[in-house]
Image (cartoon, rainbow, N blue to C red):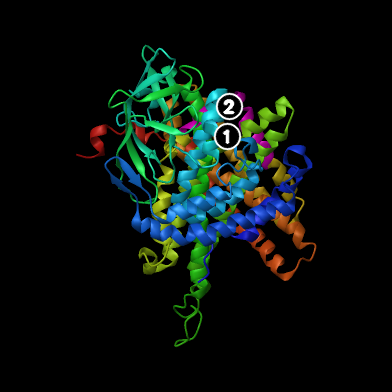
């Protein structure tokens, strides 16, 4: 059975036909990234993913990470993979070459990340945290901090993490108790405990640079008094080499449902009073700074979930084509078996997976494309518009996408039947690994609250309306294609219902019905995501319909027809359900609020 992690034809379609990413190379900033270069990058990423990362996926899952006397060991196979990953300069794909990056467009990096995460998402967690921590240094660090840390991080010589969560605080970051005490030399001694720290300790690198949230003595309570510090595992000598151990100790690793190749650590800082950190950015502005890393991480998490789902789909598709079981329903008695892809329910399941995974790819790559356009723009208002679109889309890209991704991984397992539940095939690991994406970097309930409470009213609601305008443009284009008019009408009706629903909830937010609004926040995230998925699929279908009119080659014709049929399936079967959900939201049922705590059960 063929092993794949992402459909190259579809990746190329999104890059070159939907987003036309080569247009970025017309600008000096991305002039090197012509179509030939982009295709070469994607091919190299695919080769590394299939030959190295995928090959150690199961081995690393079975071996897992070990903890012994404060030291963490990752799966042996990860060391070779990490060396190759570093050699390819894949950690800082979009960053300044002066610091060890490649300076490539974010959209192209998304394609590479699609392959890497689909092949081995637990391995990728090590690299994502390094980059995120490095980005904080680049954005908020002093010249000395950048010189000391940044190139070592972006090249993967040193690792990185994010020390945010505490045992009692959880998602309520403002309740953290980790404290920072000023030293005479301008540094701080750090005291506290952190939990759920991905790559908090690892033997892949010689040093680990931890961004740590803490409260300086005397600072205000809540998030207003949180500062951000850089705390290396080993202090850095004047010559740039790792020096004395910095009293930041891993006290254990979690035994998890999935992502066994990624160590999730509990960390103690300053147990001996000798943990030294340097302020990163300004005092009491740590939470604002940390959101730079968190927003990047949320888009990465959406990619992680989607990549698992996409790999699960391709595994299921290959299996369904090969697995012979049961005669056709209309065949005479005694007929021989057929590949299960010919059975109606399997076809429905596979088409559901295909359309959802392809729409996710378009949505995630589109966010990356917006980042690239913002980078290239010199117009202040235009840049603000792009940023507003990104801000509205982030909770959808993280929350909605990972919710659907887990469902797709479950469907992918189901196609295999009983075999899917065994370790003989990768489906059960993809399902286990995918599940964490709905939880970390802000649970999906928090993403829903963010969409409703912050992003819906962002820029006085202009950011949300700018997104609506983007969808309306695609609807207008689709109405020019005879085959797509009815689909455009359904999406238009759904979009109008979404605007009405958003208006109703926005009104509730400013009234005594605020809790009613938030009890429907997650359903609102769902219907927003459904609508945007319909948009992405209709956008694809517009391109495909035009290409079909040019009498393409047989293989291309099959691909394009699949885009039109897939859009028809999703828009006709999913969007009417989304409209019904919107009616439920607008009705404003308060049962969840009215229920007495004691009535939930004894």
Identity of the residue drawn at 36% across and 29% down: 246
Q: Dot 2: within a 10 Å radius of its alpha carbon, few (fewer than 14), some, or many (20 or more) residues?
A: some
Q: Is residue 108 left or right of residue 587?
A: right
Tell me whether the residue at label 1 lies in contact with that at label 2, contact meaning CB atoms closer than 8 angstroms. yes
Image height of 278 relative to 361, above or below: above
Q: Is residue 494 left or right of residue 218?
A: right
Main SS of the magenta segment? Answer: helix
> Tag 2, which secondary structure?
helix
Residue bounds of the magenta highlight:
449-471
**Residue on which the image places disc 2:** 458
Q: Nearer the viewer, residue 385 or 174?
A: 174
List the single residue furthest toward the left: 602
Whether residue 469 is in magenta: the answer is yes
Image height of 209 relative to 284, above or below: below
Q: Which mark is residue 392?
A: 1
N-terminal of the pair, mark 1 or mark 2, is 1
Image height of 61 relative to 241, above or below: below
List the single residue furthest toward the bottom: 334
In the rendering, at what x and y percent does residue 534 appear?
A: 60, 49
Q: In which quadrant of the rendered view does residue 270 lie?
A: top left
């Amino acid at each position: 059975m063929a092993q794949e992690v992402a459909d190259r034809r579809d990746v190329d379609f999104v890059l070159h036909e939907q987003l036309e990413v080569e247009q970025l190379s017309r600008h000096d900033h991305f002039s090197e990234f012509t179509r030939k270069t982009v295709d070469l990058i994607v091919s190299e990423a695919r080769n590394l993913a299939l030959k190295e990362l995928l090959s150690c996926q199961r081995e690393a899952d079975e071996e897992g990470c070990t903890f012994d006397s404060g030291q963490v060991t990752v799966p042996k196979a990860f060391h070779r993979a990490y060396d190759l990953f570093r050699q390819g300069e894949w950690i800082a794909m979009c960053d300044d070459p002066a610091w060890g990056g490649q300076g490539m467009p974010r959209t192209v990096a998304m394609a590479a990340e699609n392959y890497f995460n689909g092949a081995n998402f637990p391995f990728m967690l090590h690299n994502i945290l390094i980059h995120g921590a490095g980005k904080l240094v680049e954005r908020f660090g002093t010249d000395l901090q950048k010189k000391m840390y940044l190139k070592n991080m972006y090249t993967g010589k040193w690792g990185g993490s994010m020390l945010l969560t505490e045992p009692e605080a959880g998602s309520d970051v403002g309740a953290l108790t980790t404290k920072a005490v000023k030293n005479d030399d301008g540094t701080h001694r750090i005291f506290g405990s952190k939990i759920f720290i991905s790559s908090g300790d690892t033997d892949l690198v010689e040093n680990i640079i931890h961004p740590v949230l803490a409260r300086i003595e005397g600072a205000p309570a809540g998030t207003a008094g949180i500062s951000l510090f850089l705390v290396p595992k080993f202090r850095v000598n004047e010559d740039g080499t790792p020096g004395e151990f910095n009293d930041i100790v891993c006290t254990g690793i979690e035994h998890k449902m999935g992502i066994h190749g990624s160590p999730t650590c509990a960390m103690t800082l300053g147990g001996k009073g000798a943990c030294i950190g340097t302020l990163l950015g300004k005092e009491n502005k740590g939470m604002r700074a940390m959101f730079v890393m968190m927003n990047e991480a949320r888009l990465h998490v959406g990619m992680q979930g989607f990549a698992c789902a996409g790999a699960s789909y391709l595994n299921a598709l290959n299996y369904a084509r090969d697995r012979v079981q049961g005669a056709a329903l209309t065949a005479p008695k005694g007929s021989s078996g057929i590949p299960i892809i010919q059975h109606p329910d399997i076809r429905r399941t596979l088409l559901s997976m295909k359309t959802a995974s392809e729409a996710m790819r378009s949505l995630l790559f589109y966010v990356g494309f917006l980042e690239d356009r913002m980078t290239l723009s010199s117009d202040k208002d235009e840049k603000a518009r792009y940023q507003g679109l990104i801000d509205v889309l982030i909770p959808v890209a993280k929350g909605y996408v990972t919710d659907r991704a887990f469902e797709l991984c479950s469907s992918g397992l189901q196609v295999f039947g009983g075999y899917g539940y065994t370790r003989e095939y990768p489906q059960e690991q993809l399902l286990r690994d995918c599940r964490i994406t709905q939880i970390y970097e802000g649970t999906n309930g928090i993403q829903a609250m963010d969409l409703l409470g912050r992003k819906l009213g962002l820029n006085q609601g202009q950011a949300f309306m700018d997104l609506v305008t983007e969808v309306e443009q695609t609807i207008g284009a689709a109405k020019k294609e005879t085959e797509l008019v009815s689909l455009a009408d359904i999406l238009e009706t759904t979009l109008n219902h979404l605007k009405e629903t958003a208006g109703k909830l926005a009104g509730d937010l400013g009234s005594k019905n605020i809790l009613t609004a938030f009890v429907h926040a997650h359903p609102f995230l769902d219907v927003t995501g459904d609508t945007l998925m319909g948009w992405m699929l209709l956008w694809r279908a517009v391109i495909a319909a035009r290409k079909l009119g040019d009498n393409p080659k047989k293989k291309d014709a099959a691909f394009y027809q699949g885009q039109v049929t897939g859009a028809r399936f999703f828009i006709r079967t999913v969007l009417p359900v989304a409209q019904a959900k919107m009616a439920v939201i607008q009705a404003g049922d308060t049962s969840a609020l009215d229920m007495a705590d004691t009535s939930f059960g004894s």
